[in-house]
Amino acid sequence: QVQLVESGGGLVQAGGSLRLSCAASGINFSFNNWGWYRQAPGKQHELVAVITSGGTTTYADSVKGRFTISRDNAKNTAYLQMNSLKPEDTAVYFCNVHKYGRNWYDWGQGTQVTVSA
């Protein structure tokens, strides 16, 4: 059974930083591409960043230069370092296997990120 557990969210002022973690179990972590997604109130899930099994990273234009995705295969964990946060980054953040341009598994509980102006 696949489990995705996101953590590290919180309330931060604009310009601040947070580091999100995604602990995965029940899956061959190292063989998969991983994505961080976010969902703002009233909106659909938005892909924020992807890291391939080989370590190549891509980012949405809205976070490029501010967010960094990484992975630790030994710990079955993906990370999202978020710097220079803006109020428009406020959302629930989720991780998932990224396959064929979308999330592959059901969503976990996510972690709330709130950025105050």
Image (tube, helix red, strand yellow):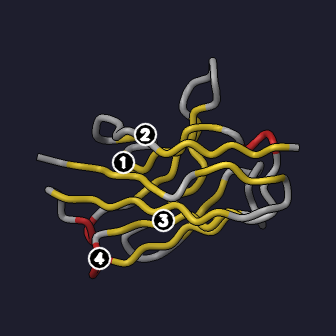
Of the numbered discs in the image, which one, if any, rests on residue 102? 2
The reply to whether the C-beta atoms of the residues labelled 1 and 3 are less than 8 Å apart is no
For the residues labelled 2 and 1, the Cα–Cα distance comes to: 6 Å
User: Mark 4, residues whose alpha carbon is within 10 Å: few (<14), some, or many (≥20)?
Assistant: few
Of the numbered discs in the image, which one, if any, rests on residue 51? 3
Residue 24 lies in what quarter of the image? bottom left
Query: What kind of residue is marked 1?
Result: Lys
The reply to whether the C-beta atoms of the residues labelled 2 and 1 are less than 8 Å apart is yes
Q: Earlier in the sequence, mark 1 or mark 3?
A: 3
Q: Is residue 114 above or below residue 7?
A: above
The reply to whether the C-beta atoms of the residues labelled 4 and 1 are less than 8 Å apart is no
Q: Which is closer to the viewer, label 3 or label 4?
A: 4
Residue 48: x, y in percent? 60, 49
Of the numbered discs in the image, which one, if any, rests on residue 75? 4
Q: Earlier in the sequence, mark 3 or mark 4?
A: 3
Of the numbered discs in the image, which one, if any, rests on residue 30? none
Q: Which is closer to the viewer, label 2 or label 4?
A: 4
